Image (cartoon, helix red, strand yellow):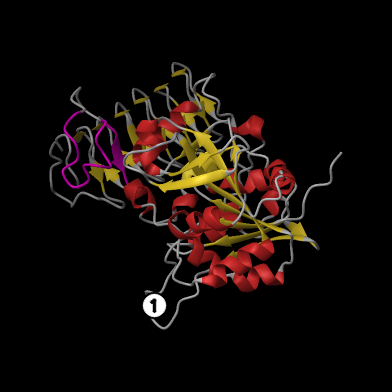
Amino acid sequence: MREPHDALVLLLAGGIGSRLNLLVGHRAKPAVPFGGLYRIIDFALSNVMNSGLTRVGVLTQYKPLSLMRHIGTGEAWDFTGRTRGVKILPPRTGEKDSDWYKGTADAIRQNIDFIRANPSEQVVILSGDHIYQMDFDAMIAYHCHKKADITIGMMVVPKSEIHQFGAGIVDDDNRIVDWEEKPAQPRTNLASMGIYVFDTNYLLETLCLDKTEHDFGMHIIPRAIEEDRVYAYPFYGYWRDVGTVQSFWETNMDILQEDSGISPEEWGIRPNTEADGRPMDRAPARFVSGCSVKSSMISAGCVIEGTVIHSVLSPGVKVEKGAVVRDSVIFEDAVIQEDALADLAICDKRVVVGKGAVVGHGENRKKVNTEYPTHLYSGITLIGKAAIVPDGMIIGRNCRISSGYRLEAGVSPVPLGDGGSL
């Protein structure tokens, strides 16, 4: 049995993730809850753990506090001990507070001292906002076999989607011979997953060559392809970027489909159930006589009196008598009160949908949100953290209710038409 490599892992977790809209209003994108029990970053951290790698630096930037609390000491992923650990690496601001990370390569460059303080033969660079399972140790072995300077995890995607990615053109030996960053007219369907293995010495040297090269995909990789040995590591499993409201909802729904390819429990993905002061002491989910649950994921601490269909419910959600939750993702401790409806909705933590209220009214899903037409366009309605939807309020499709929303005393709730925001 091969001994695992002792590579250093750098996990990029500082992106704003603005396309997730209200879901990143109070937290970093990798800290967004996912799949009932997890946060998005749990997938990357668990893959690192399951690959036998033990030293991790997490590069944070945007609204990092919830992410830092969630990671804690790293004990949830076995990153505690004399030779193992996870370290939070905040941004190194320059003379101006605005001198934050200018790109992926700049983020790594600003943490060169951490790389030097943790000697290794290879550095693995990951994004903290993807849903997948991968053996990084096998990728490192491939990298060593190819005698590569850089190895990039890559997978085939439809050409209609390639404009979202870096794209590599390879020869018969999987060596990358040309590169297109987010091409409008792609020549290949092989997309970068944002997963890199670098020889450590090569990484340190290349980052020091030109400090105006801020991004791997835009700057470092195209130059390296011309001058050095860059290889594609083919990946054939399930992988999703959940950086939009639509992809986030779709990937949650994939968990409910047996043949979708995603299975966090079988993959060995670990949540941190001790984070945020909420230990593993929630009671089992309770299903009250007369309730109905179909094709759904119901977490511990939930109380179901009404109907739940094809939905993902995080711990502590309450669905009261006569209430219906359909095609929705409901975060921790939300309450869908008596006779209310949540249909094609994403409700953040501690949301309350009042008695008889409707979130997701009507069949018209085509009228996009007027403020965020590229975020809410398929019928999904987004309810922000701790918002209260008043009793009897009717909310249409592609709507957005701000975090903490409350109706002023004495004001009657009015219908919110398709594509509106409060």
Region rendered in magenta: 366-386
Q: Residue at x 30, y 40 (%)?
A: 382
Q: Which residue is mark 1?
A: 97
Q: Residues within 10 Å of mark 1 (few under 14, many from 20)?
A: few
Q: Residue at x 38, y 29 (%)?
A: 320
Looking at the picture, does residue 264 appear above or below residue 310?
below
Image spot of residue 88 (x, y percent): 59, 64
Relative to 422, 66 lies left or right: right
Q: Considering depth in this image, is 400 or 178 the residue closer to the camera?
A: 178
Quadrant location of the N terminus in the rendered image: top right
Q: Residue at x 44, y 80 (%)?
A: 94
Image coordinates of residue 367 in percent, x first then y, are 16, 32
Q: Is residue 150 left or right of residue 35?
A: right
- Left or right position of 365 against 252: left
For the image, the number of numbered tags is 1
Image quadrant where residue 122 sits: bottom right
Magenta region's main secondary structure?
Answer: loop
Decide: is 292 above or below 331.
above
Say if residue 237 shows up in the picture: yes
- State which quadrant residue 200 falls in: bottom right
73 and 130: which is toward the camera? 130
Residue 291 vs residue 371, the one in the foreground: 371
Compared with 212, 409 (above or below) is above
Query: Does the magenta-highlighted stretch encompass residue 320?
Result: no
Say which residue appears at 63% left-offset and 32% top-offset: 265
